[in-house]
Amino acid sequence: MTVVKRMRVKLALNFVFFVLLLYAAGGLSAIGIFKYGLHRAMDSLLIDLLAEIRPSVQVTEKGVPSLKSWANVALIERMPVLATIQLFNKDGTLLERYGPAGVPVVHNGRIQSQDKSVTVMSLSAPVTRHGTNFGILEVQASTAQDDRTLYELIFAVVIAIPIIGGLVAAAGYIFAGMALRPVERTMDLLRHFVADAGHELKTPLSVIEASVETLQEIHAQHNISSLETEMIRKASDRMKGLTADLIFLAKVEDPMAAFDKVSINLNHLVEEVADEYLPLAATRSVGLTLVEEESDIYIMAEPESFRQLLSNLLSNAIKYTDPGGKVNVLLKRDQLSPMIVVSDTGIGITDASLPNIFDRFYRTEKSRSRDGGGAGLGLAIVKAVADAHHATVTVESEIGKGSTFIVFVSATG
Ligand SMILES: Nc1ncnc2c1ncn2[C@@H]1O[C@H](COP(=O)(O)OP(=O)(O)O)[C@@H](O)[C@H]1O
Ligand SMILES: [Mg+2]
């Protein structure tokens, strides 16, 4: 994935996260407000009902409250009784009940029957005559309908989350793409600039190189040894390497440049690169070994860039290992994925530097003081080539003990 694409996905995901957060806050407040509204509506219903029935309560001569005469009228007039009306004596013993089954206790507020079959809102008021308390009148209404409505709302809010999430993700991805287009264009321009500048530098560099060579030949003929010409030669060599790296990096990172990936024998490639580095390892007195756990591992890759990836890892391993140390290249298969492990017993990398070593032009303090070092583009190239091949590179390192770079290759490229 290119940097811009990664940024695009990240932006879209952030967008989804914030919209869903807002949606959750909105949904929760809507549910809260709705619940409060239902509660208020039922409360005022019960208050009205209680006020309406209260005057119909009669108190017998024995001081017992009764609603019988009201009930007779209600029965004759076929008035439907939807609420539960209950009459208790002063001690809370149920005397009379009309309407559907409620919860036979004196209570104010929401209450559930013991068998949990009925849940009601209950409101009670004392039955008084001339200042004397004779009992308690209570009205109850079932909350079943309100509860069902509330659950339906909650269900609707929850069920909408994946739909909203999906739509927002799609919209976010499209918008992020639009917003990032200028960034992409700038990066494109920059890439082209680097590639063009690199190509333009090649010609004057070749002139310098050729001239220095001629100069050195002339010097040799006249038995002159010149430190300056040798310095110019070294500097032009480094510049040549640097321009080549820059051009290569610009090419590998170009999303438009489709790689011609072909099936290559990874064993052969690794053997060739290791052979190439045997002389360097020998001059530095570093032991270089190659272990192939499996033969005929084939991968889909662009041969030149993949060779460069291996070459950069190997040159680092040799460069950053002191004489007497060892570099080992291991080729194997982890489950189905081919895997290349380049380990050394070298100087190692500090934990603080590890996250940065794949950045362009990054070099650790220790490596700066070493001669023969590059400009810090080697691992940036390794990373870019790996990305272009859907491969991953991981590194483990301990200061003074050595480093291990592992390339997990995707067999299909
Ligand atoms: N095998 C290794 N052992 C120790 N340090 C390493 C190793 N490979 C890379 N590094 C560190 O990572 C830095 C970046 O590597 P690279 O991009 O190849 O740049 P360069 O080799 O040109 O310095 C190096 O400067 C070095 O500090
Ligand atoms: Mg390097």
Image (cartoon, grey):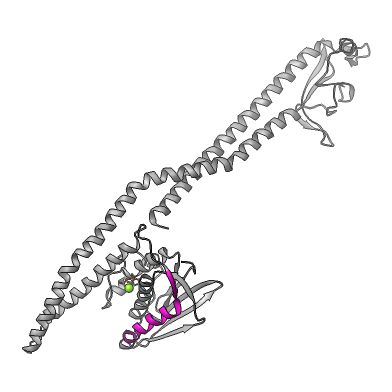
User: Which sits in the foreground, 236 or 189?
Assistant: 189
Q: Where's residue 48, x and y in %?
A: 73, 15
- The quadrant of the picture showing ligand 1 is bottom left
Magenta stretch prevailing secondary structure: helix
Q: Residue at x 50, y 73 (%)?
A: 338
Q: Residue at x 56, y 39 (%)?
A: 24
**Where is residue 225, by image quadrant?**
bottom left
User: Which sits in the foreground, 200 or 406?
Assistant: 200
User: Which sits in the foreground, 135 or 201?
Assistant: 201
Q: Where's residue 258, x and y in %?
A: 38, 61
Taking the magenta stretch, the answer to whether it contains residue 263 is yes
Evaluate whether residue 344 shows in this view: no
From the viewer's perspective, tell me whether residue 238 is left or right of residue 53. left
Q: Is residue 362 above or below residue 291?
A: above
**Farthest residue in the right direction?**
62
Classify the position of the N terminus by image quarter. bottom left
User: Which sits in the foreground, 232 or 107?
Assistant: 232
Q: Where's residue 31, x and y in %?
A: 62, 33
Evaluate whether residue 365 shows in this view: yes
Q: Which residues are magenta?
A: 262-281
From the viewer's perspective, tell me whether residue 71 is left or right of residue 229. right
From the viewer's perspective, tell me whether residue 407 is left or right of residue 151. left
Q: Where's residue 317, x and y in %?
A: 37, 78
Q: How many marks?
A: 0
**Where is residue 47, by image quadrant?**
top right
Taking the magenta stretch, the answer to whether it contains residue 352 is no
**Where is residue 140, by image quadrant?**
top right
**Farthest residue in the left direction?**
222
Q: Residue at x 28, y 68 (%)?
A: 245
Q: Is residue 32 above or below residue 411?
A: above
Q: Residue at x 45, y 51 (%)?
A: 9
From the viewer's perspective, tell me whether residue 4 is left or right of residue 248. right
